[in-house]
Amino acid sequence: MILENSAKGQKYFHHQDSHHPHRHTGSATPAISVQKSGTREIKVVRRVLDVNEKMAEENRRLFTQKGVFVLNVMSSPGSGKTTTLEKTLIKIMPEVKCAVIVGDICTTHDADRLATTGVPVVQVNTDAFGGDCHLAAHVIEKAAGGLDLDDIDLLIVENVGNLVCPAEFDIGEDSRVVVLSVTEGEDKPVKYPLMFRECEVALLNKIDLLPHLDYDKHKAIEFIHQIHPDMPVFEISARTAEGFDPWIKWLKGRIRDKIG
Amino acid sequence: MHEMGIALQIVEIAAASIPTDLGNVRVARVNLKVGKLAAVVPESLRFCFSVASKDTPLDGAELNIAELPVVARCKQCNYEWTITNPVFKCGTCNSGSLEILSGRELDIESIEIAEEDKNDSGK
């Protein structure tokens, strides 16, 4: 059956492994067969999100051609993405030239905060694009149009705060990072396995609060590794800037791997 | 949470898949494969589909969803198994280096065209 054959070519976990969207199987003329119920079945065999995947590939080609490393940052709301990015930008610039695309359902608060670091920031409010829970590839294409890509090494995309939907949408990024904070449940990784499978690295944020909480950090890391064995986990506090050096080193290494 | 967007895509792809030489036909069923790890809730998708398909050749069509299990293969020892609880480690050699064979699908397999209503055609 077509299903088994086509399954091999699909995009699965670890999005960097394979970016080949599902192709049409069969010829240009549709295969039509008559079903028991009397209906005529027409083979389609298409990935529902293939439009997004094609656009993501186009984005990826453009970013590669321009020598831009793209980081897709995802987390639940309130985990400290924006503060983490502020600190990351301060530490990585001016050695690495950065820009940020910020996705929010509405308001420009995050963009305003990030702009104080001096980086070009493009704010995307998803409601204007008819979506509400994630950034899709066409939104990134449009937002990137407002940036001088020739003058950027690292493009950070701060996705909409949501541990479910953004994991499903390739935007043409090189790497995905998930931010998890110690004020959330230790079991978040097993509740949102897709997100933790899809991301390359995890940042465990707000560790300055650990003495005041009953949070079991080791249990959380164990859960992360249950979903994604060997996933690098950097323990940080975006408030105090504690623990950022290994994370920045890792990020610089990944950027160097791509753009030299 | 993005089921409406997915439903709209399904309607668009399915409507474009109707061979033009069939003329004005109605789609009775859309056969969809959804992996257990796709961020999609079947019930919610069915509801959104019923709304998104209004005034299209898919109006009233059944969205037939086949849910596919998460199947993995160990890259170390080639052991293949179905992941039912969220532990992504090989049950045989404990390696975490896996290839996910199924579970991420969100594919339209086929559409089924309804037989013409004899009463309608006689009018």
Image: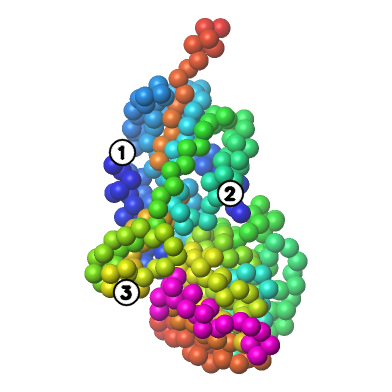
Q: Is residue A128 rendered to the left or right of residue A136? A: right
The quadrant of the picture occupied by the C terminus of chain A is bottom left
Residue at the image point whose x is 59% and y is 71% from the top: A75
Element carrying mark 3: loop
Question: Mark 3 or mark 2, which is nearer to you?
Answer: 3
Q: In this view, does A49 lie above or below B53?
A: below
The quadrant of the picture occupied by the N terminus of chain A is top left
Residue A33, x across and y down, in percent: 34, 28
Residue A112, x across and y down, in percent: 74, 76
Asked whether disc 3 touches disc 1, contact meaning CB atoms under 8 Å apart, the reply is no
Location of residue A256 by image quarter: bottom left
Q: Name the residue under label 1.
A: A27
Residue A130, x across and y down, in percent: 66, 52
Name the subunit of mark 2: B
How far is disc 3 from disc 2 in space, using C-alphas? Answer: 35 Å
Residue B109, x across and y down, in percent: 40, 41
Q: Mark 2 points at which residue?
A: B3
Magenta residues (range):
A208-230
Magenta stretch secondary structure, dominant = helix
Q: Name the residue under label 3.
A: B95
- Residue type at numbered disc 2: Glu
Residue at the image point whose x is 47% and y is 42% from the top: B65
